[in-house]
Image (spheres, rainbow, N blue to C red):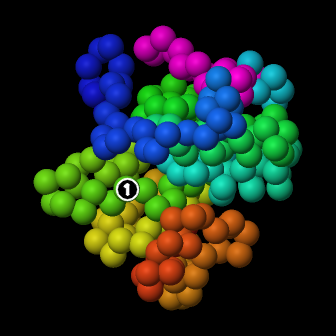
Amino acid sequence: MSEEDDGPRRTVHGRRRGRPLRKGRAAALETTLPVHQIALPAAGGQIDFSGLFGRRTAETWLEIGFGGGEHLATLAARHRDISFMGCEPFINGMASLLVAIEREQLDNVRILMDDARLLLAALPDRSLDRVHILFPDPWPKKRHNRRRIVSPAVLDQLARTMKPGAMLRLATDHEDYGVWMLRHLLDRPEFRWTATRADDWRIRPAEEPETRYEAKALAKGLKPIYLTFLRR
């Protein structure tokens, strides 16, 4: 996160496009994305949720780096009375979610195809009821660790934008990143780890849909960890 006066800058690393999109997904980028995309305000401005969703709902959930969007789409279809926001800079993943939005007619989802830090900077204080960061890029090389989304700057923004009692749920199949996540969050007095036994972090919470990244990890014999924290 930049500390300069002109606001946070885009800090997306890695590729943003994969294999060529199939016709239906390419069409969804053209027609569905404009309807559901989040228009960021000018630097220093804040997003008006009632204007963004056209209504006010009891809760607002955010997923940072939703990959192919299957987790976000499943939750949005399950909880149509909740407003959902998602960030994903990868075009192919965005297109996959857009197809699901069309298929399930999800009018409670708004999305940003860009760096999640830009969205966090534009959110009002105490506006989020739940945040998911599931299987983010681990950036395993030590010289790339600073690119990890779980960072002091992002945790500062989450502490600001999450309501008291709001849930932060993280998952990773990368052992070093799991230790990194836990260490950074345990250093923060704003967050409380809810685990009371090993199964609390070894087993995916029952209410959480499986993601494709989790399925791939399990197929490889990896053992993901799941961390749940509450905003104090």
Q: In this view, does 179 lie to the left or right of 29?
A: left
Count of labels in the image: 1
Q: Nearer the viewer, residue 13 or 24?
A: 24
Quarter of the rendering occupied by the C terminus: bottom right
Query: Which amino acid is tagged 1?
Result: Asp
Q: Does the magenta stretch include residue 49?
A: yes
Q: Main secondary structure of the magenta part?
A: loop
User: Considering only vertical position in the picture, is 112 above or below 129?
Assistant: above
Q: In this view, does 97 lie to the left or right of 185?
A: right
Q: Position of residue 87 (x, y in %)?
A: 54, 39
Q: In this view, does 30 lie to the left or right of 227?
A: right
Magenta highlight range: 31-50
User: Considering only vertical position in the picture, is 165 above or below 202?
Assistant: above
Q: Position of residue 166 (x, y in %)?
A: 62, 53
Given the current orientation, which residue lies at the most extreme left position? 143
Q: Which of 213 and 86 is in front in this view?
A: 213
Quarter of the rendering occupied by the N terminus: top left
Q: What element carries label 1?
A: loop
Residue that appears at 81% across and 34% down: 107
User: What crowding class fits label 1: few (fewer than 14 Cα within 10 Å), some (14-19), or many (20 or more)?
Assistant: some
User: Considering only vertical position in the picture, is 218 above or below 57?
Assistant: below
Q: Is residue 179 visible?
A: no
Q: Does the magenta stretch include residue 98?
A: no
Residue that numbered label 1 is attached to: 137
Q: Where is residue 138 in the image (x, y as percent from the top left)?
A: 33, 60
Residue that appears at 71% across and 75% down: 206
